[in-house]
Every structure is written in C-alpha cells, then in structure tokens.
Amino acid sequence: MALTGRQLLIIGSILPGIDISMKQGFTFIETILYVAVIAIMMTALIPFVGNLLINSSKSMAQQEVSSNARIVSEKIKYEIRKATAFTVPASNQLSLNSGATVITLSSGQVTINSVPINSADTIVSNLIFENLTTGVRYSFTIGSNFGGTRSEYQSSMFIEGSAQIRI
C-alpha cells in the first residue's frame, strides 16, 4: 500500500526525527547491477549475432550458386531437347539446328545466342559439350562471384548432365 502525500505529512509531524519522503530513481548500486547484467547479456548475444550473419552469408552464396546451376542446366537441356540437329564445333560450344541456337561460354557467362543465362553473381568455368550421337553430354563448374575473398562468400559446384535431341 503506497502512502499519499497527506499521510506522509501526518507521519512526519508525529515522528519529527524520521525522514519519510518519496524517493524516485535508482541508487548507484542498482545502476551498477543493471549495467553488469546488460553487459553479460550483450557478451552472450554478440557472438550469436555474428555467427548468424556469417551463416546467412554462406547460405546466400550457396543458394545463389545452386539456383543458377539448376537454371543453366535446365535451359541447356531444354534447348537440346527441342533441337532437331546439333554440332559441337568446339568443346565449349554447342550449335543447334544448323546454328540457329548457339550455346557457349563467354567471360564466365553461359550464353544462348549471346544472351547470358546465369546471373552476374555467379561465374561458370570449364563448360564442356560432348557428342553422344543422338544427344549431348555437358558439364560445367559454377561458383559465386561476389568479389569478396572471405570464405563465407565462396561457393562452387560441379554439374554434369545429358539430353537427347528430337528425332
């Protein structure tokens, strides 16, 4: 039960040697304890948040590489499957339907008729096409291209697949 101002005045007049007043705020000891508790909590939280950010960066790089690998592989398969003829003029180039569609590797980008398939955040290397008589086997390595040298921004994967042309 809190005392009102009038009750404090009455008690103060009855007991003149006792200082009964409403104190507000924190004492110095309470402030030090609160700061210590907050410091301990921050000491535990900062490494947790740091690890969360690092794992988020790793996940983003892996997801970008994986997504682009799937897109490039599926687009190559699609183009091969809808073709009626093909040639492999060079190991990193595929010509479909007498040159109407050309898939090649140019400056880290897989291109179809000079249009890049993979994003600028990924770089493709070692694109190889192999003639299988009625189809084509392809393989490539795709990696992240975020520009950072830190390990959490690095990811790569090797993809291999094949598709047959329409006969």
Image: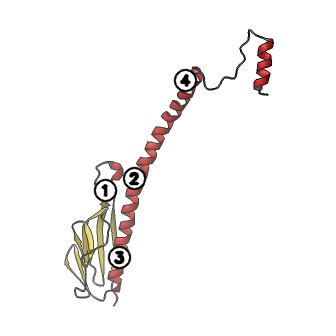
Q: Which coloring applies here?
A: secondary structure
Q: Depth-wise, is mark 1 or mark 2 nearer the camera?
A: 1
Against 48, residue 32 (above or below) is above
Q: Secondary structure at mark 1?
A: loop
What is the C-alpha distance between the residues marked 3 and 4? 64 Å
Residue found at the very far top of the displayed protein: 17
Amino acid type, callout 1? Phe
Find residue 32 and report its image quarter. top right
Q: Looking at the picture, tell me which residue is in the foreground, 160 or 43.
A: 43
Q: Which residue is mark 3?
A: 75
- Residue 39: horizontal and vertical position, in percent? 50, 30
Q: Which residue is mark 1?
A: 146
What is the C-alpha distance between the residues marked 3 and 1? 23 Å
* Residue in the picture at 69% in, 23% down: 22
Question: In terms of sequence position, does the residue under pointer 3 or pointer 1 come before the other?
Answer: 3
What is the C-alpha distance between the residues marked 2 and 4? 39 Å
What is the C-alpha distance between the residues marked 1 and 2? 11 Å
Amino acid type, callout 4? Ile
